[in-house]
Amino acid sequence: MNDSASKIEKHVFVDKENLPLIAHLQAICPEFSKQKLKRILQAGSVWLTQGKSTKRVRRSQRKLGIGTQIHLYFDEQILTQQINPPELVADAKDFSVWNKPKGMFSQGTKWGDANSICRWVEQNGFPDRPAFQVHRLDRATSGLILVAHNKSTARKLTALFENRQVEKHYRVSVEGNFPTIDLIDSDIDEKQAKTVILESSYNENLNQSALIVRIETGRKHQIRKHLASLGYPVVGDRLYGNNFPDALKTPTINELTKGIPTGEIRAKNRLSRNERADLQLESCFLRFKLSDDDKRYEFSLPK
């Protein structure tokens, strides 16, 4: 059991033949009701290893053979977390386009997939179609995301993203008056990375700049890292913006005139995690061409 009472991780080999999975789970976690164990299954928190294959499983009545290994990853937050639903932007039958809200995962983890876009679409959007992930957005990032509805389309769309054949624009607010530059091309994790600045406007009252950027590579947290490296972190960035103005309250005149060291002022005035704004980063435009129909698809979100 984990240090946190809200998390449990267990790995158990089956030693009794032909019992349903739910019976094994009741033996593994006697403190949980049968109903709660079924919720844990539906949340995607249980995996089975049979031979060399490990797969997520949801069927409570599935019979298991001796030697099968059960993996249970229970996180109370996954069962109880409430998230806003995504909005359908377009339905192309073989794939659909959604406006993913902040807080929703692009993909599940070993702890579950209940709050992922694909699982939500399978359960609530198009229950009669399978859903396949083809690309991802950070959990804190909102905006356009594609979901494929068959394996063939999933392979094609995944290849487009991997081969950088999808044009992707993001709408982002940063702290400060962003300079007049067109390209950020500093390496990320020792790999080439390119972020193109398409538009920029400055709001003097907020001391923030609104940007439209296009990424030509897909490094992890590329936009956030590139902008923070220049000293203009994304508004609400709790990971890369903590040492920048978005994480700080403005010092008062009294503090400045009393000669309090700047470091002490910053420590005193640092905003709590709950006080800070959400990450101001949105996927707002996608354009690509599928090889089988030679049609160019274009999707955008209104400003």
Image: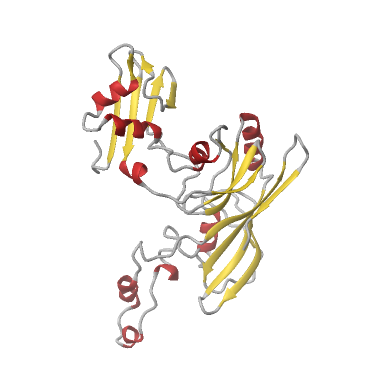
Q: Nearer the viewer, residue 156 or 165?
A: 156
The answer, for residue 147, to whether it is visible in the render is yes
Q: How is the image coloured?
A: secondary structure
Residue in the image at 56% along x and 71% along y: 209
Residue 185 % position (x, y): 61, 57
> Residue 285 lies in what quarter of the image?
bottom right
Please identify the residue farthest to the bottom as the structure is shown: 257
Please identify the residue farthest to the right as the structure is shown: 294
Q: Taking 245 as reference, is 145 left or right?
A: right
Q: Nearer the viewer, residue 38 or 196?
A: 38
> Residue 197 lies in what quarter of the image?
bottom right
Question: Against 283, is 80 above or below?
Answer: above
Please identify the residue farthest to the top as the structure is shown: 17
Question: Against 299, is 180 above or below?
Answer: below
Residue in the image at 66% along x and 37% along y: 93
Q: How many callouts does the rendering have?
A: 0
Quarter of the figure with the N terminus: top left
Q: Taking 131 as reference, is 254 left or right?
A: left
Question: Against 281, is 74 above or below?
Answer: above
Question: Against 227, is 94 above or below?
Answer: above
Q: Taking 206 as reference, is 69 left or right?
A: left
Residue 255 % position (x, y): 32, 83
Please identify the residue farthest to the left as the structure is shown: 31
The answer, for residue 195, to whether it is visible in the render is no
Residue in the image at 48% along x and 54% along y: 102
Residue 20 % position (x, y): 33, 18
Q: Taking 86 as reference, is 298 left or right?
A: right
